[in-house]
Image (cartoon, grey):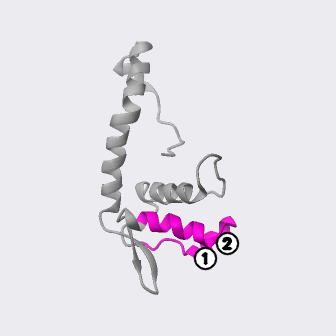
């Protein structure tokens, strides 16, 4: 995780989104422990309550579970749940805009598929 915070979005939400990205990218796998609240707060120089709020959102979404005295762990099926939600969001929100640009520029499938993937795979 990078210690840079964007303006306009609460830090706890950005932290939550970074953990989600780590799950989607396979950095955090099912059963893996999340970094401790104390460590994340110290590393990013943020209030532990901010980290706790981010982790609580993940728990509320049933992506992670708290194990008393042991920490927070990625739930089984969390990645599949996130992938499904991200695919749906993409198809409903992003794809229509992308498709409109493709149509406007009259790009064909061959041209689109010839472009190498970007090395920046940030969700």
Query: Which residue is at 42% across, 59% downward?
Result: 23
Query: Which residue is at 59% across, 54% downward?
Result: 10
Q: In the structure shown, which secondary structural element does the residue marked by tag 2 occupy?
A: helix
Query: Which residue is at 61% across, 74% downward?
Result: 39
Q: In the structure shown, which secondary structural element does the residue marked by tag 1 occupy?
A: helix
Is residue 47 located in the magenta-colored stretch of the structure?
yes
Is residue 29 located in the magenta-colored stretch of the structure?
no
Tell me residue 80's x, y (percent): 30, 56
Q: Which mark is residue 112?
A: none
Residue 29 in sight: no
**Residue range of the region highlighted in magenta in the rendering:** 32-58
The 10 Å Cα crowd at callout 1, few under 14, some 14 to 19, many 20 or more, is some
Asked whether the residues under the numbered discs 1 and 2 touch, taking CB atoms below 8 Å apart as contact, a structural biologist would say yes
The residue under label 1 is: 38
Q: Nearer the viewer, residue 66 or 28?
A: 66
Q: Nearer the viewer, residue 44 or 110?
A: 44
Q: Nearer the viewer, residue 116 or 70?
A: 70
Tell me residue 33's x, y (percent): 45, 74
Q: Is residue 113 above or below residue 105?
A: below
The quarter of the rendered structure image containing the N terminus is bottom right
Left or right of 117: which side holds 50?
Answer: right
Left or right of 16: which side holds 111?
Answer: left
The residue under label 2 is: 42
Q: Is residue 11 above or below residue 69?
A: above
Marks 1/2: CA distance? 6 Å
């Amino acid at each position: 995780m990078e210690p840079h915070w964007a303006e306009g979005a609460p830090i706890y939400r950005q932290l939550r989104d970074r953990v989600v990205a780590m799950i989607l990218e396979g950095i955090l796998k099912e059963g893996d422990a999340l970094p401790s609240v104390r460590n994340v707060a110290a590393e990013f120089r943020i209030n532990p309550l901010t980290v706790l709020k981010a982790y609580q959102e993940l728990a509320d979404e049933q992506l992670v579970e708290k194990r008393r005295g042991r920490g927070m762990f990625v739930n089984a099926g969390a990645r599949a749940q996130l992938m499904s939600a991200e695919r749906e969001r993409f198809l409903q929100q992003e794809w229509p805009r992308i498709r409109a640009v493709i149509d406007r520029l009259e790009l064909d499938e061959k041209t689109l598929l010839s472009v190498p993937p970007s090395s920046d795979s940030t969700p």
